[in-house]
Image: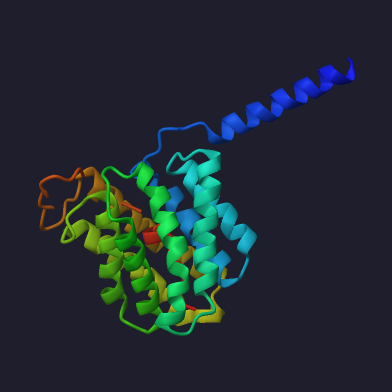
Amino acid sequence: MNRRAIILIGALAIAAAVAFAGWPRPSDLRAFEPAEMARLETAMWRDYYEERYPALFYHLYDLSRSQFGFSPFDSVRIALSAARAARTFQPTRSRREADAALPDLVTYYGLLQQAAPAAFDVREAAQLELDWWQARREAFSPRSYGLTVAEVAALTYGKPRDDPALRQSGIERAEAMGYRDTRGRTMTDQDWSEIERRLLGACKLLKAAIAGGWTGAKKPRPRPGLSGCLKSGGDQYFATTGPPKR
């Protein structure tokens, strides 16, 4: 095989790889599997606290690809913006300093919007996300910032903000965060397993809410003009995957 043929084959292989990475794919924020989402969220929380940023990026990428169906290229962009926001926020000590994370959060939610069931205000979602990060750091109760977590989910998924299932999901997610905060640096493998168990409960509630399958005392009320979630999570992500308070 001559040199020209080798170069041609190499160029075709690179072109094919680029096309595969960037080719548009059907993505959907509602497509996640609760158990896998809880596993990935727990891994991301642990990565953040142990300052394993390459691992955090990988798990964010994996979540975007496997749970929401984004292309490899978009998954990289989502993971980068989320990881940058978390890393920027981590050393801040005031609301003013924390605002430095907002541009990356706006980028993050702008990318997620492609897979949302309805258009939403990207900047509002990013600001609410940052609000609950800071509220958690300022030692607000889990129930208090959990309601803000739920607001982000409602906005992202086009659901009413007073949807009882979303509110309960946000509170349970926040209580899992509170569990971690109480233990701090003494967290054990068993504690992380407990976090995953709690997140699984929150993810199941979220899945039921966006599928219209809530069976609590009150049923979600329909909201005209919106079709029927994620920090967390993530938070979500970032609503399903929002970074811990440190």
Q: Is residue 72 toward the left or the right of residue 162 in the image?
A: right
Residue drawn at (62%, 33%) of the image: 18
Q: Quadrant of the N terminus?
A: top right
Residue 199 percent across, percent down from the top left: 39, 60
| Front-lying residue, 11 or 59 | 11
| Front-lying residue, 199 or 24 | 24
Q: Is residue 103 toward the left or the right of residue 4 in the image?
A: left
Asked whether residue 163 appears in the rendered view, the answer is yes
Residue 82 percent across, percent down from the top left: 49, 59
Residue 155 percent across, percent down from the top left: 26, 56
Residue drawn at (70%, 23%) of the image: 12
Locate residue 7: give its quadrant.
top right
* Residue 52 position (above or below residue 182): above
Name of the residue lying farthest toward the front: 4
Residue 227 percent across, percent down from the top left: 20, 43
Q: Is residue 148 toward the left or the right of residue 163 in the image?
A: right
| Front-lying residue, 168 or 71 | 71
* Residue 130 position (above or below residue 141): above
Name of the residue lying farthest toward the top: 1
